[in-house]
Image (spheres, rainbow, N blue to C red):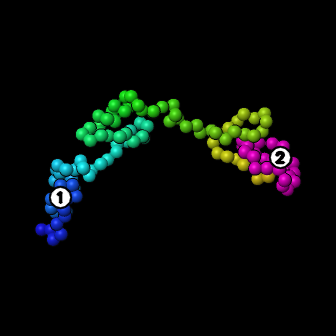
């Protein structure tokens, strides 16, 4: 027994809390209210579906023709922080910023004496 019957907003029939969902009472008018936009699993773009079309078929057609998925784009570079020392070509995974000049350097050139720091800071000794 339900003391508060619920009215379906699509077919306007009355149901208990266990059968109020469109799928639970096989609502014939669910297409009016239950609007979902499928998303392409490859490129994560929303795929518009017209009334009466099967979403799986539309997404499949999108994947065959219009999909902008590029597998090479998925591979992200890890070592992107290039050393600012003129002759060095090393790249690090994380930024190593000099406290005096604010430049980004590799592990080998992180110390101010190793990259001929021109920043305004406390003088550093060779020790």
- How crowded pointer 1 is (Cα within 10 Å; few <14, some 14-19, many 20+) is rated as few
Left or right of 48, for residue 108: right
Q: Nearer the viewer, residue 23 or 13?
A: 13
Q: Magenta span has 115? A: yes
Picture quadrant of residue 21: bottom left
Q: Residue at x 76, y 42 (%)?
A: 109
Q: Residue at x 75, y 50 (%)?
A: 102
Q: Residue at x 79, y 36 (%)?
A: 86
Q: Residue at x 87, y 54 (%)?
A: 123
Residue 90 on image: x %, y %: 70, 36
Q: Is residue 108 visible?
A: no
Find the residue positioned furthest to the bottom.
3
Which residue bears the numbered disc 1?
12
- How crowded pointer 2 is (Cα within 10 Å; few <14, some 14-19, many 20+) is rated as many
Of helix, strand and loop, which one carries label 1? loop
Q: Label 1, label 2: how many angstroms apart (C-alpha)?
A: 75 Å
Q: Which residues are magenta?
A: 101-127
Which residue bears the numbered disc 2?
117
Q: Is residue 98 above or below residue 17?
A: above
């Amino acid at each position: 027994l339900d003391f508060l019957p619920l009215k379906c907003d699509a077919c306007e029939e009355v149901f208990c809390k266990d059968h109020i969902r469109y799928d639970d009472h096989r609502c014939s008018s669910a297409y009016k209210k239950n609007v979902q936009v499928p998303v392409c699993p490859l490129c994560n773009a929303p795929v518009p579906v017209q009334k009466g079309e099967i979403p799986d078929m539309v997404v499949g057609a999108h994947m065959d023709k219009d999909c902008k998925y590029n597998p090479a784009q998925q591979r992200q570079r890890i070592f992107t922080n290039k050393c600012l020392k003129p002759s060095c070509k090393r790249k690090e995974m994380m930024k190593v910023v000099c406290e005096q000049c604010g430049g980004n350097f590799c592990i080998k050139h992180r110390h101010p004496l190793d990259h001929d720091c021109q920043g305004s800071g406390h003088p550093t000794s060779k020790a």
